[in-house]
Image (spheres, rainbow, N blue to C red):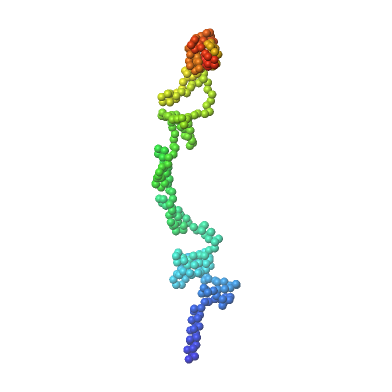
């Protein structure tokens, strides 16, 4: 009977031990609710199993490889440190600090870029990322003043109008277009009462030697003529007459009566020669007071 009681008590104690939380170290009665096994000490640490690790890809422990396994390598040819088994990469992975991580990345990371068609892919340590679109080729074409851009074989639309050359009186230099070329075809500028044409800043000319610019009456075509042809090379006087005055002095010495024109109040009148420097109006042209007499004499 006593043996049965002892066996029952032993089973109850064993069952409590199996399902209970366990703590090793200081304050054994104080344990976090989520802890299955808790270690606490100010002077002692946890020492992991020390395995001689030579090949990080080889599982050298007993049983089948499982995740969550921790070891410490001190004597193997693999770098010293703490390792955990990664089922994804099927190898032991060493735990490193941030400073060591920078060195490892710099010395052991292999980056490869590959461009195919219009796609760029990057491979880091054998892992290839998703491709991205890039510009592999870009060409510009100008046809009849229309600019198109062809990127990776695809031509832009619509085209953009650009200035590529100049002619018919215009000159293109270093991207600037300015007057100064040779006309290559008949050219007309149309002006109106509202939209006039003006040129400012013209310099003084010499009527004795320069030519004059004239416009043809039918089509407005510009031509040049000698100032002498138009009688610009001349001298003139304007005088207000007295009542009944008929004789007037000429601007120059008379050498040819055909070179003299006389106007009374803007109307041409006949005259005769008095002497080398005077003319006399015909009787029917006798002046009234303040009539304007203008005498034009060609050189």
Q: Residue furthest bottom?
A: 1
Between 294 and 87, the one lying in front of the other is: 294
Q: Position of residue 172 (x, y in %)?
A: 47, 34
Q: How many numbered dots are placed on residues in this image? A: 0
Q: Residue furthest right?
A: 43
Between 125 and 9, the one lying in front of the other is: 9
Residue 256 visible, this orientation: no
Q: Position of residue 297 (x, y in %)?
A: 51, 14
Looking at the image, residue 286 lies above or below residue 155: above
Between 176 and 3, the one lying in front of the other is: 176
Residue 186 visible, this orientation: yes
Looking at the image, residue 188 lies above or below residue 74: above
Which residue lies at the image location 45% right of the left edge and 69% below the top edge?
A: 65
Q: Would residue 21 appear left or right of 147 to someone viewing this image?
A: right
Which residue lies at the image location 44% right of the left edge and 50% below the top edge?
A: 134
Which residue lies at the image location 42% right of the left edge and 46% below the top edge?
A: 151
Which residue lies at the image location 43% right of the left edge and 54% below the top edge?
A: 131
Q: Residue furthest top?
A: 275
Q: Position of residue 21 (x, y in %)?
A: 52, 77
Looking at the image, residue 125 lies above or below residue 218: below
Q: Position of residue 264 (x, y in %)?
A: 50, 15
Between 202 and 191, the one lying in front of the other is: 191
Looking at the image, residue 291 lies above or below residue 72: above
């Amino acid at each position: 009977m006593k043996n049965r009681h002892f066996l029952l008590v032993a089973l109850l104690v064993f069952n409590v031990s199996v399902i209970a939380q366990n703590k090793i170290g200081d304050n054994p009665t104080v344990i976090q609710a989520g802890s299955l096994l808790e270690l606490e000490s100010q002077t002692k640490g946890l020492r992991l199993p020390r395995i001689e690790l030579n090949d990080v890809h080889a599982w050298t422990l007993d049983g089948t490889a499982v995740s969550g396994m921790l070891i410490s390598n001190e004597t193997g040819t693999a770098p010293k440190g703490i390792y955990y088994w990664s089922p994804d990469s099927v190898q032991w992975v060493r735990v490193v600090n941030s400073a060591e991580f920078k060195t490892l990345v710099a010395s052991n990371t292999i980056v490869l870029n590959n461009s195919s068609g219009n796609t760029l892919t990057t491979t880091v340590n054998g892992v290839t990322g998703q491709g991205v679109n890039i510009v592999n080729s870009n060409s510009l074409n100008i046809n009849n003043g229309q600019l198109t851009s062809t990127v990776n074989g695809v031509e832009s639309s619509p085209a953009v109008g650009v200035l590529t050359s100049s002619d018919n009186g215009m000159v293109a230099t270093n991207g600037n277009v300015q007057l100064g070329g040779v006309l290559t075809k008949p050219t007309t500028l149309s002006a109106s009462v509202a939209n006039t044409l003006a040129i400012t800043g013209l310099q003084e000319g010499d009527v004795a030697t320069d030519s004059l610019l004239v416009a043809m009456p039918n089509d407005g075509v510009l031509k040049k003529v000698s100032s002498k042809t138009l009688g610009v090379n001349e001298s003139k006087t304007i005088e207000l007459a007295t009542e009944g005055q008929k004789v007037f002095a000429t601007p120059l010495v008379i050498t040819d009566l055909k070179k003299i024109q006389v106007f009374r109040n803007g109307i041409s009148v006949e005259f005769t020669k008095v002497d080398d420097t005077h003319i006399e109006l015909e009787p029917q042209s006798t002046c009234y007071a303040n009539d304007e007499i203008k005498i034009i004499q060609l050189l």
